[in-house]
Image (spheres, rainbow, N blue to C red):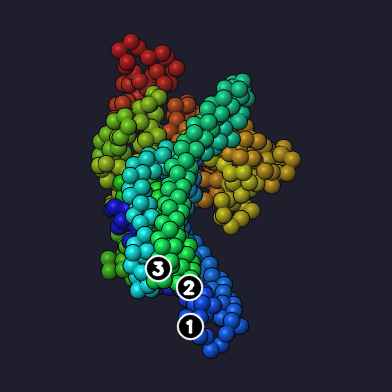
């Protein structure tokens, strides 16, 4: 999609509001036609060329009435413009956020969080500005068309010189297009770098302090800020330079008009009223000239912002940015939700089976977004066949992975660092888009794993848990209605009850940004409690116990085995406490399955597993 198509789709998204805004500002910009004619009549009356029946008092009353009418229309225009601006920015931000939430969790955004914030904030604002300025430009064009007709009827030669500055402005703007795009892109990139740097510093305060790297980090931030300052100055300079061209070209045109008008007035072919009309209208033609230049500048800058917004889509069609339909974000009325649920159930009732989530993924529209709340048949067997995913940046990943997870089983995935353990879990859960392979729940194909593997079907704890700057209780529940017995049970299984008792405010303790007030082990066990409180059929742990001591880890696995009932577990770990409990172990190497079996079988047959079990150093041949 080109910038022109993007602009047009935004315009058509809310055509009624855009037209209302356009009409409001067209009237605002055309009302000054009347004061110009009134002023001309006043001076013509002074010269005796025109007799006014209502006198000077009547002209004064008309001027006041026109001014009040314009003030009222400006109030209306501010309302329509604000309404349109907010709807445009809301549309773009909502659609981008929806796309991010629909993307696989491990690849939700293609850039640093700080740069993503810049996209959501600055680039959307730039598109909003361009759309708003277009209304002023089109409104002023109506004024220019009518005023041109009036001025040409008085003196065509002088009218020509009114529009000479406009030609100069358009030419200057076209010449400056390349530099506008260059400096705007550089300033946006520099701003994103500064924003990302701030985000990273706040997220890693402890690591910076421990390493004694405060001075180096501050110097780096100063360097990035200085680069941003230079780019912003260049961007502002080119913008102000164009504004200078706009202003001075208009002044040149005004001077020419005054010189020519003097000669014409001496010959008697040009009246004082005509001169006042030309001077008055030229002021508003100036606004058109400035608006044309500013709009062209904003339009070129919008092209840069549009390319950055498209980058956020990671290859998805750019038309998603301007899609007007409801896309699964925000509050909905209960009746709408019930209707969607019934529609989904009706669509799937023909099979004669209880609707499964994998089938719901075939349903288009809103019902499939509510899949997690519809009945799902109990897990008997989860299968993955030929699962493949390679990271585009490195080509590494997993290839042709197949596994079977029977109901109630405890399967451990292990292997050396970089063998693909975390990638396997993410591809299975839909957090990474699998390039090949299929996943089946009780033999039923799961077409959208990201929508499928959510509570109460499955729960997942990532290798690096994420906590919010909120109460410990809220970090565990994450909006789940509080059930005291379930929460107490989850804390017990996660071996967190003693830690909670020692905290000053218990579960109401504020954990700080990313849980900085908790230890690494407490953060991991909080994430485990968050998962366990949801009572899923499938629990997926990614190296959960890496920050736990041996005794705490032993308690966690023992309590999990005692409480999980028939729940199925898929665990990434290299620790003996987990491996010794496993019904089945999968050993990965370079993204493929090297060996699998029980711990006893692998100790006898797999050199890689023996290295993990006994902690031996890898041999020279990499075995």
Q: Which residue corresponds to the image point at 35% horizontal and 36% vertical from the top-left?
A: 424
The numbered dot on residue 306 is none
Asked if the residue at tag 1 contacts the one at tag 2, i.e. Cβ–Cβ closer than 8 Å, the answer is yes
SS at mark 3?
Answer: helix
Instruction: Name which of mark 2 and mark 3 comes first in the sequence.
Output: 3
Which residue is disc 3 drawn over? 267
SS at mark 2?
Answer: helix
Tell me where residue 564 appears, x and y as whole percent.
50, 45
Query: Distance between the Cα atoms at labels 2 and 3?
Result: 15 Å
Query: Distance between the Cα atoms at labels 1 and 3?
Result: 20 Å
Q: Residues within 10 Å of mark 2 (few under 14, many from 20)?
A: many
Q: Residues within 10 Å of mark 3 (few under 14, many from 20)?
A: few
Question: Which residue extends farthest right?
Answer: 504
Tell me where residue 197 appears, x and y as whole percent.
52, 34
SS at mark 1?
Answer: loop
Q: Which residue corresponds to the image point at 57% horizontal and 22% vertical from the top-left?
A: 216
Asked if the residue at tag 3 contacts the one at tag 1, i.e. Cβ–Cβ closer than 8 Å, the answer is no
Question: Which residue extends farthest top?
Answer: 620
Q: How many marks?
A: 3
Tell me where residue 293 appears, x and y as whole percent.
40, 53
In front: 242, or 218?
A: 242
Instruction: Name which of mark 2 and mark 1 comes first in the sequence.
Output: 1
Question: Which residue extends farthest front?
Answer: 267
Query: Distance between the Cα atoms at labels 2 and 1?
Result: 10 Å
Asked if the residue at tag 3 contacts the one at tag 2, i.e. Cβ–Cβ closer than 8 Å, the answer is no
Q: Is residue 120 left or right of residue 469?
A: left
Q: Which residue corresponds to the image point at 52% horizontal and 27% vertical from the top-left?
A: 223
Q: Which residue corresponds to the image point at 41% horizontal and 71% vertical from the top-left?
A: 268
Q: Is 505 situated above or below 329?
A: above
Q: Residues within 10 Å of mark 1 (few under 14, many from 20)?
A: few
Which residue is disc 1 drawn over? 50
Which residue is disc 2 drawn over? 273
């Amino acid at each position: 999609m080109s910038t022109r198509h993007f602009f047009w789709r935004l315009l058509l998204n809310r055509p009624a509001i855009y037209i209302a805004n356009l009409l409001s500002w067209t009237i605002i910009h055309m009302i000054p036609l009347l004061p110009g004619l009134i002023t001309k009549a006043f001076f013509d009356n002074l010269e005796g060329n025109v007799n006014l029946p209502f006198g000077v008092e009547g002209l004064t009353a008309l001027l006041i009435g026109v001014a009040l009418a314009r003030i009222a229309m400006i109030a209306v225009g501010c309302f329509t413009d604000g309404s349109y601006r907010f709807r445009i920015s809301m549309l773009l931000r909502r659609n981008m956020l929806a796309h991010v939430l629909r993307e696989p969790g491990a690849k939700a955004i293609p850039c640093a969080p700080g740069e993503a914030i810049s996209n959501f904030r600055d680039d959307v604002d730039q598109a909003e500005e361009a759309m708003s300025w277009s209304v002023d430009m089109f409104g002023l064009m109506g004024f220019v068309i009518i005023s041109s007709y009036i001025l040409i009827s008085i003196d065509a030669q002088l009218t020509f010189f009114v529009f000479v500055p406009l030609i100069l402005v358009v030419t200057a703007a076209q010449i400056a297009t390349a530099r506008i795009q260059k400096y705007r892109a550089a300033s946006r990139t520099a701003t994103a770098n500064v924003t990302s740097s701030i985000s990273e510093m706040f997220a890693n305060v402890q690591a910076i302090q421990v390493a004694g790297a405060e001075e180096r980090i501050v110097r780096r931030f100063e360097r990035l800020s200085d680069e941003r300052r230079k780019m912003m100055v260049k961007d502002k300079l080119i913008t102000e330079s164009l504004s200078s061209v706009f202003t001075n070209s208009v002044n040149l045109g005004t001077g020419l008009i005054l010189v020519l008008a003097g000669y014409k007035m001496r010959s008697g072919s040009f009246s004082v009223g005509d001169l006042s009309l030309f001077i008055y209208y030229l002021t508003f033609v100036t606004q058109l000239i400035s608006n044309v230049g500013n709009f062209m500048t904003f339009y070129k800058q919008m092209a840069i912002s549009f390319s950055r917004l498209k980058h956020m889509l990671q290859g998805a069609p750019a038309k998603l940015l301007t899609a007007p339909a409801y896309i699964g974000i925000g509050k909905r009325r209960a009746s709408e939700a019930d209707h969607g649920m019934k529609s989904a159930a009706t669509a799937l009732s023909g099979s004669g089976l209880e609707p499964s989530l994998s089938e719901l993924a075939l349903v288009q529209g809103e019902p499939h977004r509510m899949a997690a709340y519809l009945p799902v048949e109990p897990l008997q067997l989860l299968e993955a066949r030929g699962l493949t995913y390679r990271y585009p940046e490195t080509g590494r990943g997993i290839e042709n992975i197949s596994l079977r997870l029977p109901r109630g089983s405890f399967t451990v995935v292990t292997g050396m660092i970089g063998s693909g353990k975390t990638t396997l879990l993410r591809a299975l859960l839909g957090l990474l888009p699998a390039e090949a392979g299929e996943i089946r729940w009780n033999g039923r194909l799961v077409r959208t794993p990201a929508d499928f593997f959510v509570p109460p079907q499955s729960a997942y704890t990532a290798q690096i848990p994420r906590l919010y700057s909120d109460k410990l209780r809220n970090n565990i529940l994450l909006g789940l209605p509080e059930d005291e017995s379930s929460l107490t049970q989850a804390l017990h299984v996660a071996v967190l009850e003693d830690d909670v008792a020692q905290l000053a405010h218990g579960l109401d303790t504020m954990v700080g940004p990313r849980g900085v007030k908790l230890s690494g082990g407490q953060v991991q066990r909080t994430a485990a409690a968050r998962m366990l409180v949801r009572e899923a059929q499938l629990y997926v742990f990614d190296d959960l116990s890496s920050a736990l001591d041996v005794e705490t880890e032993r308690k966690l696995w023992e309590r999990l085995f005692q409480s999980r009932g028939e729940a199925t577990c898929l665990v990434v770990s290299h620790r003996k406490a987990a491996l010794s409990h496993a019904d089945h172990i999968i050993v990965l190497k370079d993204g493929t399955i090297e060996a699998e079996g029980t711990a006893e079988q692998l100790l006898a047959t797999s050199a890689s597993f023996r290295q993990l079990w006994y902690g031996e150093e890898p041999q020279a041949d990499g075995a």
